[in-house]
Amino acid sequence: MTMSKSMQHIDHKRTVIKLGGSMLSGLSDVFFSKFVQLQKEGHELVIVHGGGPFINSALIEKGIKSHIDEGIRVTCEKSMEIVKSVLIGKVNTSLVHQLNDKGIKAIGLNGFDGNLLPCTVLNEERFGFVGKITKVNEEVLVSLLEAGLVPVVSCIGSTQCGTALNINADTVASEIALALRANSLILVTDTPGIQVGNEMQQNASPASIEQWIVEGEIYGGMIPKVNAALACLHAGIPQVHIADQHLNGTVIGFEEALI
Ligand SMILES: Nc1ncnc2c1ncn2[C@@H]1O[C@H](COP(=O)(O)OP(=O)(O)O)[C@@H](O)[C@H]1O
Ligand SMILES: CC(=O)N[C@@H](CCC(=O)OP(=O)(O)O)C(=O)O
């Protein structure tokens, strides 16, 4: 991964990897070996995970209806309990186990741990129990990285009085990448990047992404990803990758960072 001139003063190689629920049930050895390769190249890695499809199944099983509004799940109080137990109790523990099993020293966290993700309510009327991150308290992640551990973060935030809130995992990943001044963000999903017409795109600029959204080429779950990517790029992270678990995909950046 190349580093843009504006980031060359940063003396660490930090990468945030977001694993989407769409690919989590099929994590393969290829992913773990790519992960270890990045560690050997000196990258400090933080994982953020989603779990949308697992939440969908658990809600259906309990007979609770839910819907997604512009990539954000409208989350009632009952759904929030399920989101919390699925993400923290099932997806996070399973992922941490799989990483540890491959010899990668992983530790599970959510937004309550070390007050990592303090939140306010995004828009109660429209989205219910959905959080807007007020600040990432990244010191807890830095301490774990310095101890040689891989933090694995569930996308659950906490209000000041301790109410759990649901947050889109792409948003959490971009906020953490920004707080850690990461060199790159990799959003791993079930498709090798952004497809436009019949073609997968190797590179994309912010302007082309905005155009593809308007044209309807980018829709649904890809919207929070490209929004997360644009927020990172505009705040100085040189490149964001949207990739499959082989880490093949689209590199999004301003043109000078892609050269
Ligand atoms: N232009 C696009 N290129 C590729 N995938 C797209 C595009 N627009 C929308 N998508 C959809 O976005 C999905 C990935 O988002 P999502 O299912 O939310 O994944 P995750 O659970 O990994 O966050 C793809 O499987 C695809 O259906
Ligand atoms: C508020 C909100 O939308 N939260 C998401 C959190 C999980 C997630 O983002 O999972 P993926 O990465 O698999 O999409 C949800 O409830 O589905």
Image: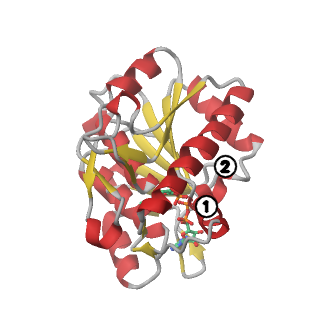
Q: Residue 246 carries which label?
A: 2
Does residue 44 show up? yes
Which residue, as the protein is rendered here, is positioned at the far bottom? 215
Instruction: Say which of 144 and 187 sits in front.
Output: 144
How crowded pointer 2 is (Cα within 10 Å; few <14, some 14-19, many 20+) is rated as: some
Q: Look at mark 1 in the image and give the residue it sits on.
A: 192
- Answer with mark 1 or mark 2, whichever residue precedes in sequence: 1
Q: Quadrant of ligand 1?
A: bottom right
Q: Residue at x 37, y 24 (%)?
A: 140
Q: Position of residue 251 (x, y in %)?
A: 47, 55
Does residue 259 show up? no
**Amino acid at pointer 1:** Pro
Q: Height in image: 53 above or below 147? A: below
Instruction: Say which of 190 and 233 sits in front.
Output: 190
Instruction: Say if mark 1 contacts mark 2, CB within 8 Å.
Output: yes
The residues tagged by marks 1 and 2 sit, at their Cα atoms, a distance apart of: 8 Å
Q: Position of residue 135 (x, y in %)?
A: 24, 40
Instruction: Say which of 232 and 259 sits in front.
Output: 232
Residue at disc 2, secondary structure: loop
Q: Where is residue 232 in the image (x, y as percent from the top left)?
A: 32, 50
Q: In this view, does 159 lie to the left or right of 195?
A: left
Q: Which residue is drawn at 30% across and 27% down?
A: 10
Q: Which residue is drawn at 70% across and 23% down?
A: 103
Q: In this view, does 252 lie to the left or right of 30?
A: left
Q: Position of residue 154 (x, y in %)?
A: 49, 43
Q: Which residue is drawn at 52% across and 67% down?
A: 194
Residue 3 quadrant? top left
**Amino acid at pointer 2:** His
Q: Is residue 198 left or right of residue 28?
A: left
Label 2, ligand 1: CB separation under 8 Å: no
Q: Height in image: 197 above or below 122? A: below
